[in-house]
Image: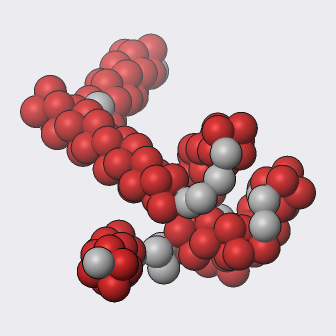
């Protein structure tokens, strides 16, 4: 009986060890994941800075909006990483949209707030903005 118990305990320990190894990422997978995360962070910074350059606001407003956008995207990613059901996740994102920018709403115009919400929802297009800017420059001359 004792030998059977010992065999069972040893096999249990070995199974936990192999399970733990399966959950650990290999070095190459970890490197790929790190590169992907760095690239995503760089794309986020570039998107926010490009968008911020389109707004006609003062430096104080610019800094508040910059911080709000960064924290919004961090919270958005955390919501996406959770194991919520689709409807719960959608409700959480709507709640985030409604309440995260309350401070910003009080210091910027409605048009600027509309642009911010478009950027958050992915509706802002840098190419369209650049075309509009070129068209205005041509019309000036």
**Residue occupying the point 59% across, 58% down:** 56
Residue 94 left/right relative to 1: right
Kindly identify the residue that appears in the image at 35 percent across and 48 percent down: 46
Q: Height in image: 25 above or below 115?
A: above
Give left or right: position of 56 versus 23: right
Q: Quarter-wise, where is residue 32 in the image?
A: top left
x, y percent for residue 47:
39, 55
x and y, in percent, of residue 86 in the image: 62, 77
| Residue in the image at 71% along x and 38% along y | 60
Q: Position of residue 110 (x, y in %)?
A: 78, 73
In the image, is 50 to the left or to the right of 31?
Answer: right
Q: Quadrant of the C terminus?
A: bottom left
The answer to whether residue 122 is above or below residue 76 is below
Residue 129, above or below 20: below
Q: How is the image coloured?
A: secondary structure
- Residue 82 visible in the current orientation: no
Given residues 26 and 45, the one toward you in this image is 45
Most foreground residue, 3 or 106: 106
**Residue lying at the far front of the rendered structure:** 141
> Which residue is at the front of the view, 21 or 89?
89
- Say which of 40 and 70 sits in front: 70
Residue at screen point 14% across, 27% down: 27
Please state the total of marks drawn on the protein image.
Answer: 0
Quadrant placement of the N terminus: top left
Inspect this view and state whether residue 49 appears.
yes
Q: To which quarter of the image does residue 55 belong?
A: bottom right
Left or right, 99 with respect to 126, comes to right
């Amino acid at each position: 009986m004792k030998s059977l118990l010992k065999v069972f305990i040893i096999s249990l320990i070995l199974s936990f060890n192999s399970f733990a190894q399966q959950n650990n990422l290999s070095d190459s997978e970890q490197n790929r994941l790190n590169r992907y995360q760095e690239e995503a962070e760089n794309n986020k910074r570039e998107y926010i800075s490009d968008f911020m350059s389109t707004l006609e606001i003062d430096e104080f407003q610019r800094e508040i909006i910059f911080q709000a956008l960064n924290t919004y995207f961090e919270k958005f990613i955390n919501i996406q990483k959770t194991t919520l059901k689709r409807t719960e996740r959608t409700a959480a994102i709507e709640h985030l949209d409604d309440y995260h920018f309350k401070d910003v709403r009080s210091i910027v115009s409605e048009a600027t707030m509309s642009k911010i919400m478009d950027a958050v929802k992915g509706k802002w297009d840098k190419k369209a903005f650049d075309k509009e800017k070129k068209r205005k420059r041509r019309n000036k001359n």
